[in-house]
Amino acid sequence: MATQKILKVGNSLGITLPANLVKDLSLKPGDQADVIRELDNSLKVNFVDSHQLSLGLSPKNRHKKHL
């Protein structure tokens, strides 16, 4: 697990992603991510536009990558 900085982005805040995660998931600027707040205040992130299919993941579910 990597510790990332929270940055000011306009009127919002953003968190950077480690370069190896970006590469592994073939993420590109403009890709979308669903962010879900869990009951314990942790976040679950689904990278909707991930371009790389993981082993063992069926093509119909390829749009759900978890962080």
Image: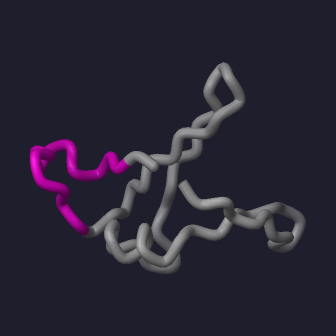
Count of numbered badges drawn on the protein: 0
Q: Which quarter of the rendered picture does the N terminus lie within?
A: bottom right
User: Is 34 located above or below residue 32 in the figure?
Assistant: above
Left or right of residue 56: residue 5: right
Residue 6 image position (x, y, % from top left): 79, 63
User: Residue farthest to the top?
Assistant: 39
Predominant SS along the magenta part = loop
Q: Residue at x 43, y 78 (%)?
A: 28
Left or right of residue 51: residue 22: right
Q: Residue at x 43, y 67 (%)?
A: 21
Residue 40 image position (x, y, % from top left): 68, 23
Is 63 contained in the magenta span?
A: yes
Residue 17 image position (x, y, % from top left): 57, 68
The stretch of residues the image draws in magenta is 52-65
User: Is 60 located above or below residue 30 in the figure?
Assistant: above
Looking at the picture, the colour scheme in use is: one colour
Q: Residue at x 46, y 49 (%)?
A: 67
Q: Residue at x 75, y 66 (%)?
A: 5
User: Residue farthest to the right?
Assistant: 11
Is 60 contained in the magenta span?
A: yes
User: Is 41 located above or below residue 31 in the figure?
Assistant: above
User: Is 24 located above or below residue 53 in the figure?
Assistant: below
Residue 54 image position (x, y, % from top left): 18, 56
Q: Nearer the viewer, residue 4 or 53?
A: 4
